[in-house]
Image (cartoon, rainbow, N blue to C red):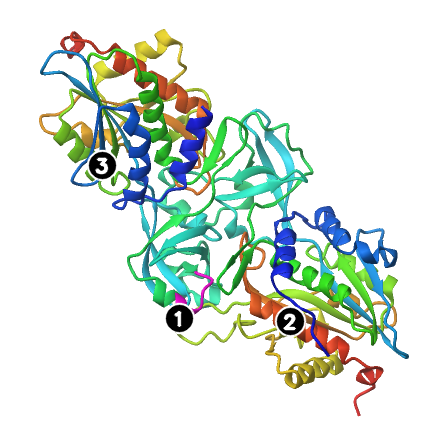
Amino acid sequence: MTIPRFGISQVKLLERLSNACSVSGDEGEVRKIILQELRPYKDDIRVDHLGNILAVRRGQEEGRLRVMLAAHMDEVGFMLVHQEDRDEGIFRFDIVGGVVASHLAGQPVWIGTEHIPGVIGAKPVHLTTGEEVKNPLSIDSLRIDVGPGNGNKVKVGDRATFATRFTRIGPSLRGKALDDRLGVAMLIELIKSAPPNIDLLAAFTVQEEVGLRGAKVAAYSLEPDLAIVLDCTIANDLPAWDNSENTRYNTHLDAGPAIYMADPGTISDPRLVRHFIDTAELAKIPYQVRQPGGGSTDASEIHKQRTGIPSISVSTPGRYLHTPVMIARFSDWKNTFSLVYTALARLTPQVLQPES
Amino acid sequence: MPELLQFLKELISTSGLSGYEDPVRRLIEEAWHPLVDEIGTSRVGSLHALKRGTGGEPRPSLLLAAHMDAIGLMVTGIDGEFLRITEIGGLDPRVLPGQIVTVHGREDLPGLIVQPPAHLLPPDNRNGPVQLNNLLVDTGLSAAEASRLVRPGDLISFAQPPFDLSGDVLVGHSLDNRASIACITQCLMELVGRPLYWDVWAVATTQEEETFAGAYTSAFQLRPTLAIAIDVTFATSPGSPGHKSYPMGKGPTLGWGPNIHSGVFRAVKELASRLEIPYAVEAMPRHSGTDAYALQVAAEGIPTMVVSVPLRYMHTPVEMISMKDILRAGRLLAEFAASLDEKFMSGLVWED
């Protein structure tokens, strides 16, 4: 078995995906890039009623499993909810998904499909009291400012997201929305080079960040034998203030793909956990078990769909999820791709036999 | 104007933290060199550019001072691939998490200011905003690379690239006070070919954000007859109290208060009215927070004035300014310089 190449051209695809704006409920920009990338397979692709992209690549072997792979297209962001001063270009906004509120003041944003630039400002420190600095800046106190004279270029209802440009730094990938463009880019590559022993049922899902809503209907439509969710999970592997051991890291960068055992929404199917760990050890691909707990993935909805779908999530670890800028490692991403590809290529119906 | 906008973008894309202004000074020197008769650097790094007048000796002189130093951060320690930091100039730590920066190590390195999760913070800082000394910079490098390339004391600049909101509005870090460098540049361009009686010293000062070292020493060395500090002021914006801020795009402000000589104030104000340059009067009841504070008390004392350009979100990486205001301030300075004649000082009396 040869693992498909995964390098510069995948990073370039990731860059396009990371720089695109696709806040939950408005995933059009990422959807367009995916449909473009998958044009050669367009006969097997459809967009469903919620905006999910469902793509099917059939294998050739007998008795093959129908395997759903899901990656969410949407990202956290904002919506303009009130025009406060049209002449001055000042808008009130609300958040979409779990944006980390402590990371908003002083950030540039892009608004709407045209990426109209704006900023989330903050009161000058000179006019701020010592007491005020001790309190967080609430979202209610912040505004999106597109500048005087530009108030008519955007409107209430427009989505906005952080204006962060993707860049590569040494071993790292840095950009916004790597949660889950890392997964989206991997899934595009898996469709292009699907192993022949399975039917690959790909779902690029919508609205993950606002309640895993796309995945629920995608799993119903695809009706798979099992599902694998490709997401991005947080690496809280920062040093502790007193140099004590950090025992709540969730995952570490540079430690390889993170295999989920349990999160608040899903107990990963133990047969799939064993399959992935066996695969990693056989193929000598680094991996880590994600600390149980934390946040959940599309698997929460998928595993309960129809009569039940054995599911597992495998994530690329990344720092600073839901903030303006994330950092992940290229090596972790590449190893995640290798692990998922290899695990797919080794999948047989025996894997799902009840444990004896 | 397109050239001035381009120059201002270059100015804010060039590093020059307080005390380390060399890179930006070289850029300013290059721009001012063809516009003046003489140019040099002070012992503390301020740029002194002289445009000679035609008046008889001893010829009076007007000093235009804009500080070129920028706020930023400094490395205090290295912890694996992370850096610990302190501030240069005044910062609200609540605008720092998630900001991209340039670490000026053995080479310039991209960095990201990050906030550790609560359980990794000291117990007294687990609620509310994370204090500056608990924030980190993630270099994105391996621990070995980070410790090879970065040392305590290395400077950190904001790295948010400048961008236009429309033809007139520019966003970026360090517009405080590179916008005022652009004002003086505009003034010098307007003075090309115009007769001047007084000498004009265009000065880019150092260390305003920390100690005013540049303004104190340049005023002493050059001993001008009059001095004007050009700086930015608070523009009306969400969260800023209305009585302490001035509309953006509606002209510069003219400072009024103890740092300001009432006669110079009157002269500049009357000139602005005559030229129909819109302005607002800015009350500065104590320390003006500008170089004027230092200029005024150099040697035997200098009659001093403050002209400011309104700017939104001061000391954040997304400061916002109107180019129109910069052009107006530049024109006002040029017209004032050109209006100074042999009689001006004899008219500058206390009307008690």
Amino acid type at circle 3 is Ser
Q: Which mark is residue B118?
A: none
Query: Residue at 35% of width from left, 38% of height from top?
Result: A126
Q: Secondary structure at mark 1?
A: helix
How far is the residue under mark 1 from the one under mark 3?
38 Å
User: The C terminus of chain B appears in which quarter of the rendering?
Assistant: top left
Number of labelled discs?
Answer: 3
B209 in relation to B232, above or below: below
Mark identifier at residue B46? 3
Residue B149 sits in which quadrant?
bottom left
Labels 2 and 1 share a subunit: no
Q: Residue at x 63, y 57 (%)?
A: A14
Quadrant (top left/top right/bottom left/bottom right) for the N terminus of chain B: top left
Residue A10 location in percent, x, y? 64, 61
Residue B324 or B273: which is nearer the viewer? Answer: B324
Q: Chain of mark 1?
A: B
The disc numbered 3 marks a residue on which chain?
Answer: B
- Residue A238 shown in magenta: no
Count residues near mark 2 (Cα–Cα under 10 Å), then give few for <14, some for 14-19, many for 20+.
many
Mark drawn on residue B144: 1
Q: Amino acid at mark 1?
A: Ala
- Magenta span: B139-145
Is any atom of residue B314 visible in this view? Answer: no
Write the residue at 66% across / 86% down.
A282
Q: Could you classify mark 1 by the number of other residues whose Cα lies within 10 Å: few (under 14), some (14-19), or many (20 or more)?
A: few
Mark seen at residue A336 = 2
